[in-house]
């Protein structure tokens, strides 16, 4: 299909002329995309699949966002003829053209990689949203739509669920929730020959699953890491990170919860509250909680999966 109504077909080939759209003209859009060469065009993307090329695959580490969320990463793999990727929320006021670099995709021969940084308006409505991506080539051919279902959460409302682990704090610092899970049957062999192992859950590894068990079925029923608040001091005002298991299929074992102080972002301190609880009826029931304070010396170190001050240890309910 030709991109007859899309300004991005022109943007992929030539610089902007006076009066045409610029990134700043996307200020009213619910989703904003930043990066080198990114450009905005009015009008929502569609999801019709009449087109055959160029192809696109998208990967998002987290399907949950909240109004005002900043600096969320999105990666993709596009067919070698693509010069860019169109990104937008369904029914938004506009969409974005993200240029494709020349980095080969080592997993898909002939493809190249793309990446984008997404931010969301404070006015983004709660509920389901559809993130749409379509590759585009130098001739204006727009490939088939690829979509990621997002959920826009209200960080001030606690949904129902079998198990929650929350980290909240009182200043505009960047604190990170790290959870180390040791299943009760760690070290035992499964029927498929794999071995049950302990694993870590945090913003860079948001799936609360043993890596050897990350099948499509397991991922679809697993818990969710929600919110990476104030990431790299891009302040979103939420000051909350959460690991949420909506159903009672969480790993049975021991949970160690750490608070990693990535940066105080210019604040003197950050007082934090770590809490594990259930909320099956609408009335949260605390399992264990603790309070602490982050100071400047806590920002030192590598900030990897096992970093941070130990805040909680508890057995799964």
Image (tube, rainbow, N blue to C red):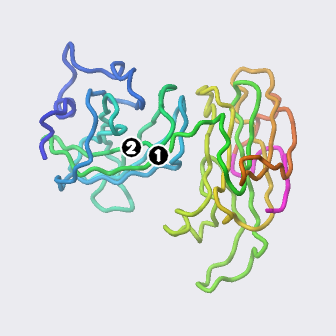
- Residue 316 is a magenta residue: yes
> Which residue corresponds to the image point at 74% horizontal and 24% vertical from the top-left?
171
Above/below status of 151 relative to 104 = above
> Where residue 4 sits: x, y (%)?
12, 36
Depth check, front residue: 210 or 289: 289
Residue 180 position (above or below residue 292): below
Image marks 1 and 2: residues in contact by CB distance under 8 Å = yes
Where is 11 relative to 312, above or below? above
Q: Where is residue 86 in the image (x, y as percent from the top left)?
A: 29, 39
Please state if 60 lies on the left or on the right of 264 as rendered: left
Q: What element carries label 1?
A: strand
Disc 2 marks which residue? 131
Residue 233: quadrant of the picture? top right
Query: What label does residue 150 carry, if any?
Result: 1
Image coords of residue 227 (percent x, y): 61, 40
Question: Which stretch appears magenta?
Answer: 304-317
Which residue is at 19% across, 29% downward? 7
């Amino acid at each position: 299909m030709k991109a007859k109504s899309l300004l991005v077909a022109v943007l992929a080939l030539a610089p902007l002329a006076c009066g045409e759209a610029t990134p700043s003209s996307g200020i009213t859009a619910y989703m904003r995309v930043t990066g080198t060469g990114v450009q905005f065009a009015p009008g929502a993307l569609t999801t019709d699949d009449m087109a055959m090329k160029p192809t696109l695959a998208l990967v998002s580490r987290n399907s949950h966002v909240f109004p005002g969320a900043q600096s969320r990463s999105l990666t993709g793999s596009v067919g070698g003829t693509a010069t860019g990727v169109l990104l937008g929320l369904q029914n938004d006021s506009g969409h974005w053209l993200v240029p494709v670099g020349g980095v080969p995709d080592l997993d898909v021969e002939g493809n190249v990689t793309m990446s984008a940084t997404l931010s969301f308006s404070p006015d983004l409505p709660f509920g389901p949203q559809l993130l749409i991506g379509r590759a585009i080539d130098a001739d204006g051919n727009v490939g088939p739509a690829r979509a990621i279902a997002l959920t826009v959460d209200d960080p001030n409302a606690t949904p129902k669920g079998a198990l929650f682990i929350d980290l909240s704090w009182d200043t505009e610092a960047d604190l990170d929730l790290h959870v180390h899970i040791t299943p009760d049957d760690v070290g035992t062999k499964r029927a498929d020959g794999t071995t049950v192992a302990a694993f870590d859950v945090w913003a860079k590894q948001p799936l609360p699953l043993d890596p050897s068990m990350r099948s499509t079925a397991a991922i679809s029923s697993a818990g969710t890491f929600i919110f990476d608040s104030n990431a790299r001091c891009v302040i979103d005002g939420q000051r909350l990170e959460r690991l949420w298991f909506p159903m009672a299929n969480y790993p049975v074992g021991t949970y160690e919860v750490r608070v990693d102080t990535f940066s105080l972002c210019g604040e003197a301190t950050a007082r934090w509250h770590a809490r594990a609880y259930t909320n099956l009826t609408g009335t949260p029931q605390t399992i264990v909680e603790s309070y602490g304070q982050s100071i400047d010396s806590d920002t030192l170190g590598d900030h990897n999966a096992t970093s941070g001050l130990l805040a909680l240890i508890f057995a799964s309910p």
